[in-house]
């Protein structure tokens, strides 16, 4: 009798949960559902008005652990939008990519090694909280077919700002430099 009653109540419970989920909710930052399913909540993007002077940077990463560019240039203080496209097929857990931009003088090999030592994981996009003071900006960790974007204001200080993919072992091949003029 209990099992039969439970089976009859299950559709009603599912419907009521679905209706409750459709109620009003507070708007927050857009979250990629694939990223959210992995338990990662990307940092909210810096809100800024696109006055037509935004540096639009597109970077592709693939299953062969390569970025399609190793250098890009922006103006000091300019708003920057970096979009990473993972053109491969492997999931983030096996071949995840991100773009992490460091401050001048930091070393991609040292930072990449420190990620593992300081608790880097999928849950923190392989950018542990303790290392974030070394980071100008970073995208979420993504897998094949996914795209991630980060928006930020370029530093006012001209120089060479190294960038890398911080997934374990990728930084040796997947790195470059953002030049601020």
Image (tube, helix red, strand yellow):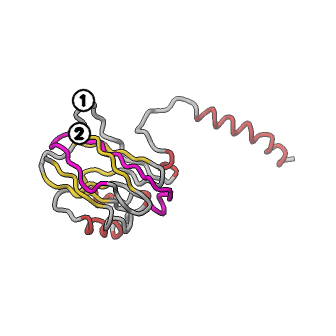
Q: Position of residue 68 (x, y in %)?
A: 33, 55
Left or right, 136 with reference to 3: left
Residue 67, quarter of the rendered image:
bottom left
* Residue 158 shown in magenta: no
Left or right, 157 with reference to 108: left
Image disc number at residue 107: none
- The magenta span reads 69-96
Label 2 to label 1: alpha-carbon separation: 9 Å
Q: Position of residue 32 (x, y in %)?
A: 46, 44
Q: In terms of secondary structure, where does tag 1 sit?
A: loop
Q: In terms of secondary structure, where does tag 2 sit?
A: strand
Residue under label 1, please give it: 51
Q: Is residue 129 above or below residue 152?
A: below
- Nearest the viewer among 90 and 9 is 90
Question: Could one spot residue 22 in this view of the protein?
Answer: yes
Left or right, 127 with reference to 10: left
Q: Earlier in the sequence, mark 2 or mark 1?
A: 1
C-beta proximity under 8 Å, tags 2 and 1:
yes
Residue 115, quarter of the rendered image:
bottom left
Single out the residue that lies furthest toward the right.
Answer: 1
Question: Could one spot residue 134 in this view of the protein?
Answer: no
Q: How many marks?
A: 2
Q: Position of residue 180 (x, y in %)?
A: 16, 48
The residue at the point 22 percent across, 42 percent down is 153
Residue under label 2, please give it: 79
- Nearest the viewer among 113 and 15 is 113
The residue at the point 87 percent across, 47 percent down is 1
């Amino acid at each position: 009798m209990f099992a039969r009653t439970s089976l009859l109540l299950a559709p009603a419970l599912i419907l009521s949960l679905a209706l409750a989920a459709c109620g009003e909710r507070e708007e927050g930052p857009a979250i990629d559902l694939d990223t959210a399913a992995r338990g990662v909540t990307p940092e909210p993007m810096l809100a800024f008005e696109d006055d037509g002077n935004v540096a639009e940077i597109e970077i592709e990463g693939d299953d062969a652990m390569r970025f399609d560019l190793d250098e890009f240039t922006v103006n000091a203080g300019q708003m920057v939008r970096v979009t990473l496209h993972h053109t491969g097929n492997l999931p983030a857990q096996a071949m995840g990519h991100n773009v992490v931009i460091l401050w001048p003088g930091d070393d991609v090999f040292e930072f990449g090694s420190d990620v593992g030592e300081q608790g880097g994981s999928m849950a923190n996009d392989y950018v542990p909280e303790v290392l974030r003071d070394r980071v100008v900006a970073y995208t979420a960790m993504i897998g094949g077919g996914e795209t991630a974007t980060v928006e930020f204001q370029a530093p006012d200080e001209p120089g060479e700002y190294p960038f890398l993919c911080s997934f374990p072992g990728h930084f040796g091949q997947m790195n470059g430099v953002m030049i601020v003029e």
